[in-house]
Amino acid sequence: MFETINLWIQDHQQLVYSLIFTYCVSKASILPVFVGVFVVSESLLLGPSMIAMISGSVAGDLLRFWLGRKYGDAIVRKMPDALSKWMGKTLRLFEHYGVAYILLCRYPNTIRSISVFPVGMSSMSFMRFLPLSIASILLWIGIYFALGYVLGEGMSELLERNLTLLSPVLLVVFLGLGWFGLKRIDKLEQQAEKAIK
C-alpha cells in the first residue's frame, strides 16, 4: 500500500504540494511527519514541500489573526455562552502566557485550528505576533518533519499502529498546561479583587 501511495504522489506532485499548502492554511497537524516520510522516499521534493508547509501555515495564521482582530468581538458575541466563556478564558490564558501560548498552540488536536484567533483579539501588535508565529511554524514543521524524515519508510508501519496516540497525548499535555494556566489566572484575579477591596 505504501508503494502505491508513493507512486500516486510521484505522478501528482503539483497537486500534492497544493493540497499540503491548503491543509496548512486550514490547520496545523501532524502533516509534516507524512511529508518527511515522502521526502525521504523521494516521492516529494524537499524545497517545494517546505515552501508549501511554511507558506500555508503563515497564510492561515495571518487569516485567523486578521479575523480575530477585525471581527473577533462580534463573532464571540454570537457564540453560545459556554463557547464564549471558553474563548474569554483562552484570551486570558494567552494574555498571561503569550509567547508560550503561541509556540505551543499548534500541537493539541482540538485547539490548533482556531488557536491564533484569540491572539488577534488581544492587545498584541501584528509586528510582535508575526515573528513569534513564524518561529512557532518553523519549530512545529522542523520537529514533525524531522521525525518523519528520520524514521523514513519504516514510519509507515508506525503510522498505521501508533501515531494515532500522538494527538491525544499532546491534547492531554496541553489541557493540563491550560488548566494550570487558568487556575493561575483565577488566583491572580482573586488576589486583584482582594487588593481592590
Image (cartoon, helix red, strand yellow):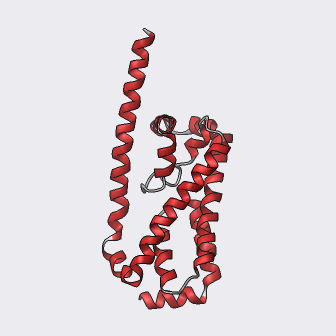
Q: Can the viewer see residue 28 in this picture?
A: no
Where is residue 67 shown, x and y percent of the image? 65, 46
Question: Is 54 on the left or on the right of 195, as rendered?
Answer: right
| Number of marks in picture | 0
Residue at the location (49% across, 34% down)? 92
Q: Is residue 26 above or below residue 74?
A: below
Where is residue 118 shown, x and y percent of the image? 55, 42
Residue at the location (50% across, 88% down)? 6
- Name the quarter where the C terminus is drawn: top left
Q: Is residue 99 above or below residue 19?
A: above
Front one among 155 and 100: 100
Where is residue 24 shown, x and y percent of the image? 57, 64
Q: Is residue 180 above or below residue 188?
A: below
Where is residue 156 shown, x and y percent of the image? 38, 81
Residue at the location (48% across, 86% down)? 41
- Residue farthest top in this picture: 197
Front one among 3 and 37: 37
- Name the quarter where the N terminus is drawn: bottom left
State the image quarter where residue 163 is shown: bottom left
Q: Can the viewer see residue 175 in this picture?
A: yes
Q: Is residue 80 above or below residue 19?
A: above
Front one among 6 and 127: 127
Residue at the location (38% across, 61% down)? 167
